[in-house]
Image: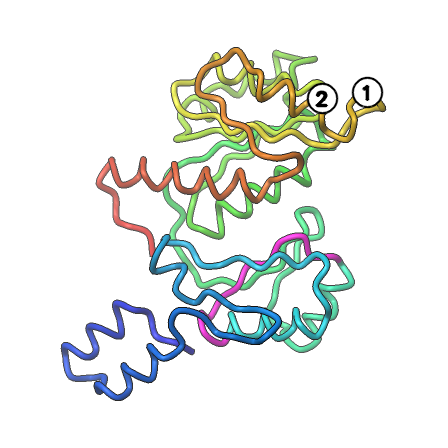
Amino acid sequence: MAMDLDELLNGVKNGTVSVDKAKAELKAAPFIDLDYAKLDMHRRIRTGMAEVVFCQGKEDAFLVKIIGKFLENDGEVFGTRCSKEQAQMLQKSMPMLQYDPVSRIISYQKSRELKGHIAVVTAGTADIKVAEEAARTCEYFGGKVSRIYDAGVSGLHRLLSNLDPIQNANCVIAVAGMEGALASVIGGLVSNPVIAVPTSVGYGANFHGLSALLTMINSCSNGVATVNIDNGFGAGFIATQINRLAVSACKEPTFN
């Protein structure tokens, strides 16, 4: 398994790692070339977050090699849009991998303290699969998450009864299908950024999420930014970046 950059440099400084060993470790920079995939092993160094594997559509043999390489080099891995069949196939050779069928995320991670606060709110129960993709992304990258599900605008009292965790969050992820009004309502109740996630949940005129997308990008509430339809991962990634900035501003310990 590859050494962490700080560990490597401190090892050279302290004399516990030879120059030749350090050179060998750095030879993989900046990526590992598998011909069919080029794994960005230095993304964590550049951005603070390691590369994520998009599993959907990948050949089984390719996926096994890609997931295995990240485990070998980083000691952890995070894969999105993984089907049950792909998960079962991967777990045969890597039984340590954990699979969540709701979010369709397969992962293995080192123990870490969760920091900050991100609220993930859904309009309905049918939106939870997208919300869980967002929430588990935040947690994998070190963010503490509050889940508030089935709190849509057709029963506004359900949302208002959960204002404390929503208003105290460093950012809020609002996940909604149908007409997608949830993000605008939350945007008018909080002082921190709202990330709107339109989902494909809805009847015919929802147009597979297009109606919610158009509502969200036309929101009259300030501080609302919108990601693509069903893109829980994208929302979780941005929320993580916002959360980290808030944690840093509070002078909490930095993230690993």
> In the image, residue 243 lies at what x, y percent?
38, 38
Residue bearing the label numbered 2: 211
Residue bearing the label numbered 1: 205
Furthest residue toward front: 35
Q: Is residue 169 left or right of residue 106?
A: left
Q: Magenta residues, as a range?
A: 72-83
Q: Residue at x 68, y 23 (%)?
A: 212
Mark 2 secondary-structure assignment = helix
Name the residue type under label 1.
Ala
Q: Nearer the viewer, residue 207 or 68?
A: 207
Q: Is residue 112 left or right of residue 182?
A: left
Q: Nearer the viewer, residue 87 or 234?
A: 234
Considering the image in quadrants, where does the C terminus appear?
A: bottom left
Q: Residue at x 43, y 67 (%)?
A: 41
Q: Residue at x 49, y 19 (%)?
A: 163
Residue 185 part of the magenta-drawn span = no
Furthest residue toward left: 14
Q: Nearer the viewer, residue 29 or 184?
A: 29
Q: Residue at x 83, y 24 (%)?
A: 203
> In the image, residue 87 lies at what x, y percent?
71, 64
Residue 185, compared with residue 114, is above or below; it is above
Answer few, some or many: residues within 10 Å of disc 1's Cα (few below 14, many 20 plus, some between 14 and 19).
Answer: few
How many marks on residues? 2
> In the image, residue 27 lies at what x, y percent?
36, 80
Residue 161, quarter of picture: top right
Name the residue type under label 2.
Ser
